[in-house]
Image: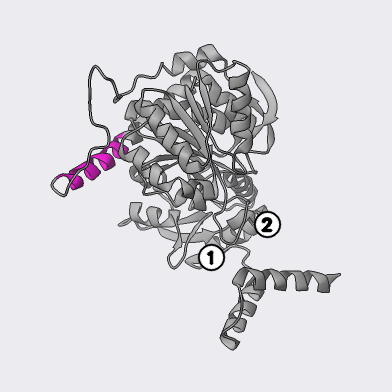
């Protein structure tokens, strides 16, 4: 059914169609509207049987989801930013126990300094936690990929994060197609856990493993992620066949057939990048886009195939590893080692800064001209940086960095008035 609705409501309706039996809710912007809507659905009897549990923290939300999952219930929760960090101990427990929990991460910057706007630093900080991470470009994909996520999680017995850009998607009102219940039921079978606590068949879930077997356990977790790559692809193909939409999968190429330059990115920025590529194509620049839809497990072979024939790959990162650089670009370099492709790292959109077509055009044209540096911070205000570095060099007691930088911004804005 076609609807004009907020992205968070679309996700809530999608999750409801998957018939969760336990929803663990703790609000944190920008995911709050998702669990609010799900709470209303449960109260109205639109999801039944389902227990909606208001917990006292994000750690409690994931701990409750773990308990529900081992008891044999289809479990769901949502979080963002600091909330995801508060869950971390339980995040690792969920994946280590092989529990098929689905969680929406409404991507938001991590503080300090406090910032409620979008980038990918929260979910990417958990790249080694053992969760499958699927990224979406728009709200239609968010609806579709949540349905796929439950199927992937339960078949692979692995938890899945569906990552959607906070505010940019969660609070955007779009025209979307929400499937009907019968079609979702046909696609997603009733939950049949691979492991469950059962008094008639007692097992130990969460047993201690010593040095004699820990490496093997970790290797098997890695092997299961590698196995998941093909199932993520086949699930997306099945979804496309039954619902008529291309959503999910490992990655998607756009105008890459003859592209000398290709741009890899995740999330909502992909749409802006596609528009920019269309503009540059009209100028005769051979450039294409690779939308990375599955970040963990990382689709190394699929990326190598997608990059065949390219000379330069530009990786757009919406997160930074301090002292190292872009996060995703490190995975890309690892995947493309021994390939004769020039890889350029662009860090952009941190803390909600707009990724504009004008700035992207400048980056892409610099790559074509051969003048793009190996690592570029797009739209970096070098004057602000220089002032702070000079302040720190001149005076030991230079004060808190965020306050000093924001004071410089305010002073400059006042000078313009």
Compared with residue 13, is residue 404 higher up or lower down, i.e. above or below? below
**Residue that badge 1 annotates:** 376
Compared with residue 387, is residue 72 higher up or lower down, i.e. above or below? above
Proximity of marks 2 and 1: CB atoms separated by less than 8 Å: no
For label 2, count other residues whose C-alpha is less than 10 Å away and answer few (under 14), some (14-19) or many (20+).
few
Q: Residue 206: horizontal and vertical position, in percent? A: 27, 37
- The answer to if 287 sits in the magenta stretch is no
Side of 324 where 96 appears, left or right: left
Q: Residue 60: horizontal and vertical position, in percent? A: 47, 39
Q: Which residues are magenta?
A: 213-227
Q: Secondary structure at mark 1?
A: strand
**Residue that badge 2 annotates:** 358
- Along the polypeptide, which appears first: circle 2 or circle 1? 2
For label 1, count other residues whose C-alpha is less than 10 Å away and answer few (under 14), some (14-19) or many (20+).
some
Q: Quadrant of residue 414?
A: bottom right
Q: Secondary structure at mark 2?
A: helix
Instruction: Name the main secondary structure of what is drawn in magenta.
Output: helix
């Amino acid at each position: 059914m076609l609807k004009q609705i907020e992205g968070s409501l679309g996700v809530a309706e999608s999750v409801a169609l998957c018939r969760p039996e336990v929803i663990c809710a703790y609000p944190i912007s920008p995911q709050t509207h998702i669990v609010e809507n799900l709470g209303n659905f449960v109260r109205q009897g639109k999801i039944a049987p389902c227990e909606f549990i208001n917990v006292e923290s994000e750690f409690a939300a994931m701990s409750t989801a773990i308990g529900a999952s081992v008891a044999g219930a289809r479990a769901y929760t949502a979080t963002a930013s600091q909330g995801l960090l508060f869950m971390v101990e339980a995040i690792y427990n969920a994946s280590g126990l092989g529990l098929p929990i689905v969680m929406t991460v409404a991507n938001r910057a991590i503080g300090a300094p406090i910032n409620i706007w979008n980038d990918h630093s929260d979910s990417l900080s958990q790249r080694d936690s053992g969760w499958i991470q699927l990224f979406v470009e728009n709200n239609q994909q968010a609806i579709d990929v949540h349905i796929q996520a439950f199927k992937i999680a339960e078949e692979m017995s692995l938890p899945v994060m569906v990552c959607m850009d906070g505010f940019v998607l969660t609070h955007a009102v779009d025209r979307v197609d929400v499937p009907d219940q019968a079609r979702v039921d046909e696609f997603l079978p009733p939950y049949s856990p691979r492991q469950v606590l059962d008094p008639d068949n007692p097992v130990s879930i969460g047993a201690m493993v010593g040095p004699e077997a820990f490496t093997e356990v970790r290797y098997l977790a890695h092997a299961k992620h590698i196995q998941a790559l093909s199932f993520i692809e086949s699930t997306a193909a099945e979804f496309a066949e039954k619902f008529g939409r291309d959503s999910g999968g490992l990655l998607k190429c756009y105008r890459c057939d003859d592209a000398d330059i290709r741009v890899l990115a995740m999330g909502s920025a992909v749409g802006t990048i596609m528009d920019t590529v269309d503009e540059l194509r009209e100028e005769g620049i051979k450039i294409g886009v690779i939308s990375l839809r599955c970040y963990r497990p990382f689709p190394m072979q699929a990326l190598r195939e997608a990059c065949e024939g390219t000379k330069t790959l530009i990786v757009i990162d919406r997160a930074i590893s301090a002292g190292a650089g872009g996060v995703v670009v490190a995975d890309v370099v690892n995947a493309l080692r021994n390939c004769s492709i020039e890889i350029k790292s662009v860090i952009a959109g941190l803390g909600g800064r707009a990724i504009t077509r004008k700035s992207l055009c400048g980056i892409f044209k610099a790559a074509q001209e051969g003048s793009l540096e190996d690592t570029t911070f797009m739209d970096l205000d070098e004057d602000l940086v220089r002032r702070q570095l000079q302040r720190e060099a001149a005076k030991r007691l230079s004060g808190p960095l965020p306050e000093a930088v924001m004071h410089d911004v305010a002073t400059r804005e006042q000078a313009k008035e």
